[in-house]
Amino acid sequence: HPPTPEVKLHLISPRITLKRSMMTTFRACIAISLLLYLSLAHQAMAFCVEKCRRRQHVSGLHLGFYRFDTESNSANNANSASLDSASLSLDNADASPNGLAPQITSLDGLDEYLDFLGGDPDDDRLTVIKFYASWCKSCAKFGLRYKKLALEEGDKVKNGKLIAPGRVRFAEVEFGANARLCRSFGIKRLPYIHMHKGSAGKVEDFVCGPKKFQQLVDKVNEYADMSVDDAMLKKELEKGDALGNEVIRELRGEQSATNATQVFRI
């Protein structure tokens, strides 16, 4: 019989096992640290890019969870000099030759917004509220014309005292300080306008850039002297038209589906 080979058992000492476990843990810690470092670097880079975009007023700037579209930067840059000069002239023109200035109420938060609309139940005048952002050049250009319109149609004050009431009340809401309020209204583009007519409630809301300012002027002329009952009737008629258009679209869709089925059967 051949000799039986010796069986040698190679035992791993506890010290070697401990060393291997420590090396595995050390490598895992390095990997986790590297991932955290890359994540922080990515966040820092995104923050820097966002900050540069805000400073440059890039068109389509991201703010919060929404994408806001403004006028093109090329047009804004081309008119930056005229905007600055217009701002200086408007600062002097805010007050008319007899010292009167437009009253534009700044609203901060939902409570002030609601108080401004319902503060005086007997006041059925048209109310115009502008939503804007301090970093938006389009909003700045729009604001110049907005102040002039308020000087023509709104309340006029002198030294903080109401001198001559107008047929329209004007207010404004700054997005940066009221982002949650603007998001609750579904505002995704600036400048944005809300128009209320006494107890008739909100009668208009729309995007209105500097190039479309005449649209706001036309709406003011339409609603300023309109009675509350007429405003409510117009509002209901517009709802009826929208509902009728929706019904017509559904009927057309059903008719198209029926025609397609008949053609398929043939």
Image: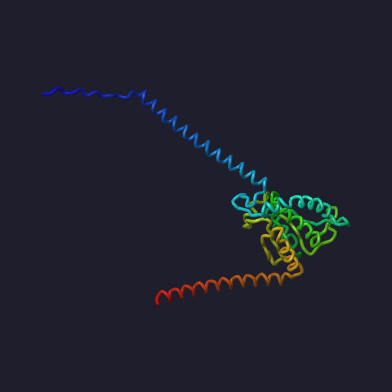
Q: In front: 152, or 243? A: 152
Q: Residue at x 28, y 24 (%)?
A: 10
Q: In front: 79, or 132? A: 79
Say above or below: 195 vs 76.
below
Q: Is residue 149 left or right of residue 75?
A: right
Quadrant of the rendered structure where residue 123 is? bottom right
Say above or below: 120 vs 249.
above
Q: Residue at x 33, y 23 (%)?
A: 13
Q: Quadrant of the C terminus?
A: bottom left
Say above or below: 257 vs 114.
below
| Residue 146 horizontal/vertical position (percent) | 75, 58
Q: Residue at x 53, y 36 (%)?
A: 37
Q: Is residue 86 left or right of residue 5?
A: right
Q: Is residue 175 left or right of residue 28?
A: right
Q: Quadrant of the N terminus?
A: top left
| Residue 105 horizontal/vertical position (percent) | 76, 55
Q: In front: 3, or 263? A: 263
Q: Is residue 90 left or right of residue 257?
A: right
Residue that sits furthest to the left in the current view? 1
**Protein image colouring:** rainbow
Q: How many marks?
A: 0
| Residue 21 horizontal/vertical position (percent) | 39, 29
Quadrant of the rendered structure where residue 247 is? bottom right
Q: Residue at x 44, y 31 (%)?
A: 27
| Residue 2 horizontal/vertical position (percent) | 13, 23
Say above or below: 37 vs 141.
above
